[in-house]
Amino acid sequence: MRQSTNYIVLLFLWFNLVFAYGISTSSGYGGFPTPSAETFKDSLDWADYYFNIHRFEDAVPLYKKNLRDSNKEQKIHILKKLALSQAALDEPAASIAYIYDYFKIDFQPTFLLHEDFDGIRDEKNFAKLSGTVLPKVTVWSIFYFFVSLVGFYVTFVLLINKKIDKQARILIASFVFIHSLFILNICVNHTNYVFEFPHTYLMSTWSSLLYGPLLFLYFKRVSKSTDLGKGDLWHFLPTLVLTVYLIFTVYGFSGTEKINQMLQRLEEGLNAGDSTRLALLVALKAISLGFYAFFVHMILNKNRIKLSKKTRIWQKNIYLIHVSYVVVYLVYGAYIIAGVNSGVFFHAPIVLMSAMVLYIGYAANVQPDVFSGLYSYTNRLFPKYVKSGLTESLSEELKQNLIDLFQKEKLYRHNDICLDMVANELGTTRHNASQLINEHFNMSFRAFVNSHRIQEAKELLQKENEFNIIDIAYEVGYNNKVSFNKAFKKDTQITPSEYLDSLKQG
């Protein structure tokens, strides 16, 4: 029965080939050329016939012959059939090689789920390939994705918080951003979605040499009263060089080229050139992290007695998390260079980076004043504000915020207003709020409040018959008429009643 079926299939193929290729002109059948016996037996249809009846040893050489002169669609078909045929013949190495060739033309990783690969599914290289390109979700990937989202949110919160010194918030926000970008990059790689979104390939590598400089410049900024200058831009030169290099070697490629680059490295492993570049990058990053960690340590030791306890604890914790990351990264880098894949040391540095993001996020929402490095220390042997951490740019920002609080929000109308209330609204310390008023307005806090109250009282008195004097006193924030009269006379040299009479006479 099976032999009869084979004859029927052969007959069917013959008629298909006759109409496909035509009949020979010399035979007198309508002027069509007749295929030679060689052409017939080497056809792709014949190869497919052998494949369908599971004569894979006969199908493979025919597929190989047709592969040379085929178009893209035919190549895709042939490479898939070759991969499946070699798997059926228990030739995993050849099968995997054809899978790679197919992926470089038409990347469809679900092809690996084909049931005909079941015979070689446990083979080491096949398991490595499928484990690298097939999308997956793990507990680690969910955690990393969550942390990266928190990090991007914290970056936004820091950038819009005008209560933090401008330069300080840009530096610390950038520090959080590159951590979050790296964690997201790890998440994408860990789930294999880097093949689905190839432009995420090495998307955080450009910032490898940026962690140390950002943290150092941030601590330098919050420990001094002077702005960072152009000379500090030299710290970003290594990052610029690395970014330009990556543009020409990775970032400038198309999505397909990036996929092929990833597949080639997966198939061939790290060659001598890749190993050298990886070792160099790891070494440079380790050196950068180590040197800048030392510089930050020097800054913290020099200025710790000047900081409030809360700020000192926050900065110490940030530094300890960073140093822990540096140590673990050195061990991780050694494993990578040695070609050893350690699960513990793969996740350890990322967990520490996640801790950094979450801790800064906590501080941004609970105690944002620590980001500006505000000093609470005062020394009576020196002038009142010599040890203040109120930098010039922060002072200007707080001044504008104070003006808005009094002119737009009319905070002075609160009859229980105090310096602590103003400091809380500004997101700074009582000491800095007092300094702000003294230096920019040359008056005490009480005089500053009264000047705004009396100014509004004058404007209200000019609106004849709309308010009486006691109503005006309550409206602008005074608790009683006596205090209002006293403050009014001190400012204008006359009482509110006399001022009202002068308006009527005028």
Image (cartoon, rainbow, N blue to C red):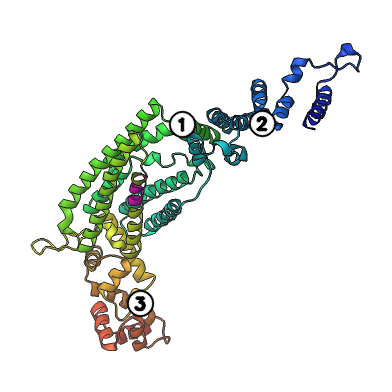
The amino acid on which the numbered mark 3 sits, given as a three-letter code, is Glu
Q: Which mark is residue 456?
A: 3
Q: Is residue 292 left or right of residue 42?
A: left
User: Nearer the observer, disc 1 or disc 3?
Assistant: 1
102, 232: nearer the viewer:
102
User: Nearer the observer, disc 3 or disc 2?
Assistant: 2
Quarter holding residue 275? top left
Region in magenta: 346-353
Instruction: Mark 3 or mark 2: name the one nearer the start of the chain.
Output: 2
The structure residue drawn at horizontal position 25% and vertical position 81%, both measured from the top left corner, is 487
Against 184, residue 37 (above or below) is above
**Looking at the picture, how far across and down is residue 342, in whole percent?**
35, 42
Q: Which mark is residue 77?
A: 2
Please tell me whether mark 2 sits on a helix, a strand or a loop.
helix
Q: Quadrant of the C terminus?
A: bottom left
Is residue 281 visible in the rendered image? The answer is: no
The amino acid on which the numbered mark 2 sits, given as a three-letter code, is His
Q: Residue furthest top?
A: 26
What secondary structure prevails in the magenta region?
helix
**Looking at the picture, how far across and down is residue 128, in whole percent?**
48, 37
In three-dimensional space, the C-alpha distance between marks 1 and 3, rounded to whole angstroms, equals 74 Å
Residue at image mark 1: 265
The structure residue drawn at horizontal position 42% and vertical position 45%, both measured from the top left corner, is 186
**Looking at the picture, how far across and down is residue 258, in whole percent?**
51, 34
Assess whether residue 86 is covered by the magenta stretch: no
Against 252, residue 301 (above or below) is below
